[in-house]
Image: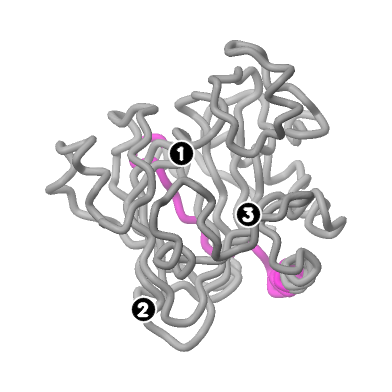
Amino acid sequence: MNNQITQDQVNSYQENGFVIIEDFLSSDELGEWRDAVEIAVKDRNGRKFSGKDTIIGEDDGINEDGEYFGKVFDQLINLWQTNDRIKKLMFDERIGQMAARLSGQEGIRIWHDQALIKRPWANPTSWHLDTPFWSFSHREALSIWVALDDVTLENGCLFFIRGSHKKTTFENPGITKNMDAVFDFYPEFRQSASVPAVMKAGSCSFHNGLCIHGAHANMTPGFRRAMTCAYMPEGSVFNGEQNILSDEQISRLKVGDPLNDDIQNPLIFPR
């Protein structure tokens, strides 16, 4: 695993809101990630979450048009909770250390992992922010995005708006059918150039959860598979949003309470 973060990469991440790590996984490691994700997805039998009845492709209530959004990507969340091989990959302290170094945080917890699979001819993913969906509000929250296939301009690569994480807020524009809806909230970036994240399989990117990003449609007959994990800095507190938390967990929390449940959000660095 190419897990050594240089100071230049830290500087680039802090300035731009994202960084690409080429050849993050060796060929053997990539094979393990692909196989583990394939089995974990199959074992879920179409369920988006563990223990819930929501089926991938169904509207989850955030969006009004389930038919369109069901064809953006297949999203399966917290595979680590239902597959031991994914758990081993997600709990790797080396990745937590990478996230901590890039974000300048002393401790990193898993918020949730998710497999994001664009099927052949899938719809684009509109420009959006990540952190406003989550149950905590921290400007240094971030995600890793691991390419399980070659990611190209044609099959649905990510795009980023460089430096947007410095000015965006926790107001949630959501993910809509209109690619440009986020710019109604942040008009200063409407004329910004976007940066494509073309990557070979086994490479990865990290991005700040407040960096504006989106993805192309898949204009090919092949799949574009990615395994991702969102990270919560240690010390984050509940902001009132439910997101992935269960009704039982929500009943025990009040705004301002620390989110330090090691069962729900394990601390992977330091440990």
- Mark closer to the chain start, 2 or 1: 2
Quadrant including the C terminus: top right
Q: What span is colored magenta in the figure? A: 14-34
Residue at 38%, 43% (x, y): give it: 174
Type of residue at label 2? Glu
In the picture shown, does residue 68 fall above or below 232? below
- Mark closer to the chain start, 1 or 3: 3
What percent of the width, then of the height, locates residue 45? 75, 68
**Circle nearer the viewer, 3 or 2:** 3
Distance of mark 3 from mark 2, alpha carbons?
A: 22 Å
Q: Quadrant of residue 25?
A: bottom right
In the picture shown, does residue 41 fall above or below 139? below
Q: Is residue 153 magenta?
A: no
SS for dot 3: strand
Task: Judge by depth and name the residue closer to the eye, 214 or 153.
Answer: 214
Q: Which residue is mark 2?
A: 154
Type of residue at label 3? Gln
Residue at 66%, 57% (x, y): give it: 48
Q: Which residue is mark 1?
A: 209
Residue at 63%, 13% (x, y): give it: 254
Q: Residues within 10 Å of mark 2 (few under 14, many from 20)?
A: some
Count of labels shown?
3
Q: Is residue 31 magenta?
A: yes
Type of residue at label 1? Gly
**Circle nearer the viewer, 1 or 3:** 3
Q: Which residue is mark 3?
A: 114
Task: Judge by depth and name the residue closer to the eye, 38 or 255.
Answer: 255
